[in-house]
Image (cartoon, rainbow, N blue to C red):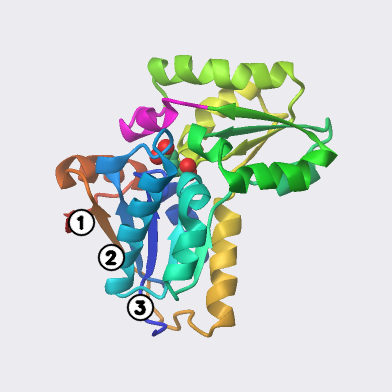
Amino acid sequence: MSSIYPIGVFDSGVGGLSVLRDIRKELSNEDLLYVADSSHAPYGDKESEYIEARSIAISQFLVDQPVKAIVVACNTATGAAVAKLRTRFSVPIIAMEPAVKPAVEKTKTGVVGVLATRRTVSSENFINLLTRFGANADIVVQPCPGLVEQVEAGDLLGEKTRTLLEPFVLPLLERGVDTIVLGCTHYPFLAPLIRAMVGIDVDIIDPGEAIARELRRRLENIGRLSRRDRLGTEQFWTSGSPKSAKKLISQLWETEVEVMRLPE
Ligand code: DGL
């Protein structure tokens, strides 16, 4: 495994671009390969076995490229598949999980809200997180069906998204939450809308930066950080239509990009 290989990043769709953005800031000279499993999104209301099979197939594709590390930029895939991925693949696998620990450390009211998909909140990983850190705070868990679809449709600020989001977010304020964890990588794209609803006194925690730092540490530890003196590149793949993915990814990445079709 060479330090010049790219880093592979995947998600059910475009949510992981919020993590890719943080990785790009942290590791400017690394080449990044992003896979959006768009024809299978959303993962959040699918069975674990299905998500596990998709995560294995995509990781296999990434390992075949080859990549030097894989970032599972999807809380739902972490919950359903990370243990299996780690037994199957020998490259370092960096995975997302809702940032309950930092939120519990931060809260002053002692009440923390977590927004995530239905599959994440019912996963064993998440239940373990609550058991480990929930004793020190009241944690209000809010599944948000439908939100991922809004981001996949590129509707980040529209009326439909706002109407969907309000009943997830406003009750958290009534419960006294002062810290909200974005437990799905699609949700950072909705942060401006969430911020407008909760005001400036509520902390919104997006774990993307922490994941990017963790990735740097892991590569550093195995001596695989790129030493090249040039800006890294990004390559985008989708299991859905490259044409619609190109439009959406260019919108979220804020640059015109090319998107390739993932082999079947
Ligand atoms: N972005 C994902 C996550 O972090 C997956 C959402 C979905 O496909 O339901 O959970």
Q: Check contact, mark 1 vs mark 2: CB within 8 A.
A: yes
Q: Is residue 155 magenta?
A: yes
Determine whether the beta carbon of the residue marked 3 sits less than 8 angstroms from the nearest atom of ligand 1: no
* Residue 28 visible, this orientation: no
Q: Count the marks.
A: 3
Question: Which sits earlier in the primary sequence, circle 1 or circle 2?
Answer: 2
Q: Is residue 216 magenta?
A: no
Rendered-image quadrant of the C terminus: bottom left
Q: Which residues are magenta?
A: 144-156
Determine whether the beta carbon of the residue marked 2 sits less than 8 angstroms from the nearest atom of ligand 1: no
List x then y, in percent, for residue 152: 33, 35
Determine crowd level at label 2: few under 14, some 14-19, many 20+ residues with C-alpha closer than 10 A: some
Q: Which mark is residue 61?
A: 2
The residue under the point 82% across, 33% down is: 110
The residue under the point 42% across, 49% down is: 16
Q: Amino acid at mark 3?
A: Tyr
Q: Secondary structure at mark 2?
A: helix
Question: Which sits earlier in the primary sequence, circle 2 or circle 3?
Answer: 3
Where is mark 3, residue-wise?
5
List x then y, in percent, for residue 108: 84, 35
Picture quadrant of ligand 1: top left
The residue under the point 37% across, 65% down is: 8
The residue under the point 50% across, 21% down is: 165
88 vs 35, left or right, is right
Where is mark 1, residue-wise?
262
Rendered-image quadrant of the N terminus: bottom left
Q: Amino acid at mark 2?
A: Phe
Image height of 18 relative to 264, above or below: above
Q: Secondary structure at mark 3?
A: loop
How many angstroms separate mark 1 from mark 2 (CA)?
9 Å
